[in-house]
Image: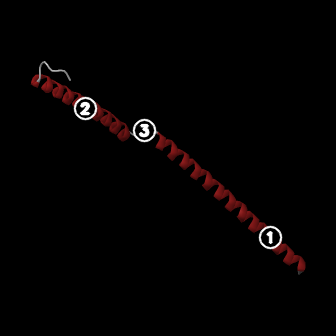
């Protein structure tokens, strides 16, 4: 009887070992899949999206318009001052 009990325990231990190995393999595969998704997400995050590119272009255009508007105001201000005092120095 002791021999049968030992055999049953050995079989149960082997089954448990197989289950643990299977679970380890499943978890390893899941970890690798998660790492792969993370890497893909990081790569996508580093790429410039079309919306971001458009926003950057619009921002550059607005900056240029702002510089031109400031130059126009400076020119008009200088022009108005020189018209008020044509012979004066500033």
Q: Nearer the viewer, residue 21 or 85?
A: 85
- SS for tag 3? loop
Lower position in the chain sequence, tag 3 or tag 1: 1
The residue pinned by badge 1 equals: 11
Quarter of the rendering containing residue 76: top left
Label 2, secondary structure: give it. helix
Picture layout, residue 75 above or below residue 51: above
Residue 16: image quadrant is bottom right
Question: Is disc 1 surrounded by few (<14), some (14 to 19) or many (20+) residues within 10 Å?
Answer: few
Residue at left 86%, top 75%? 6
Answer whether labels 1 and 2 touch (C-beta < 8 Å): no
- Between 25 and 3, the one lying in front of the other is 25
With 65 as the anchor, is 26 left or right in this view? right
Relative height, residue 13 to residue 30 (above, below): below
In the image, taking residue 58 as reference, residue 6 lies left or right, namely right
Mark linked to residue 38: none
The residue carrying mark 3 is 48
Classify 10 Å Cα crowding around label 2: few (below 14), some (14-19), many (20 and above).
few
Q: CA distance from mark 3 to mark 2?
A: 24 Å
Q: Mark 2 = which residue?
A: 65
- Marks 3 and 1 sit apart, C-alpha to C-alpha, by 57 Å
How was this image coloured?
secondary structure
Q: Nearer the viewer, mark 3 or mark 1?
A: 3
Which x, y percent locates residue 9? Answer: 82, 74
Q: Give the percent coordinates (x, y) of residue 90.
A: 20, 23
Lateral position of residue 39 relative to residue 6, left or right: left
- Image x and y of residue 57, in percent: 33, 34
Where residue 65 appears, as percent x and y from the top left, is: 25, 32
Residue at 57%, 52% (x, y): give it: 34
Q: Label 1: state its secondary structure.
A: helix
Q: Mark 1 or mark 2: name the one nearer the start of the chain.
A: 1
Circle 3 residues within 10 Å: few <14, some 14–19, many ≥20:
few
């Amino acid at each position: 009887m002791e021999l049968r009990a030992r055999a049953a325990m050995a079989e149960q231990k082997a089954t448990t070992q197989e289950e643990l190995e299977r679970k380890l393999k499943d978890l390893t595969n899941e970890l690798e899949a998660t790492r792969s998704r993370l890497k893909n997400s990081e790569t996508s995050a580093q790429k410039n999206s079309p919306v971001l590119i458009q926003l950057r272009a619009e921002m550059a255009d607005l900056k240029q318009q702002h510089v031109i508007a400031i130059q126009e105001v400076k020119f008009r201000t200088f022009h108005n001052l020189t018209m008020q005092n044509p012979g004066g120095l500033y």
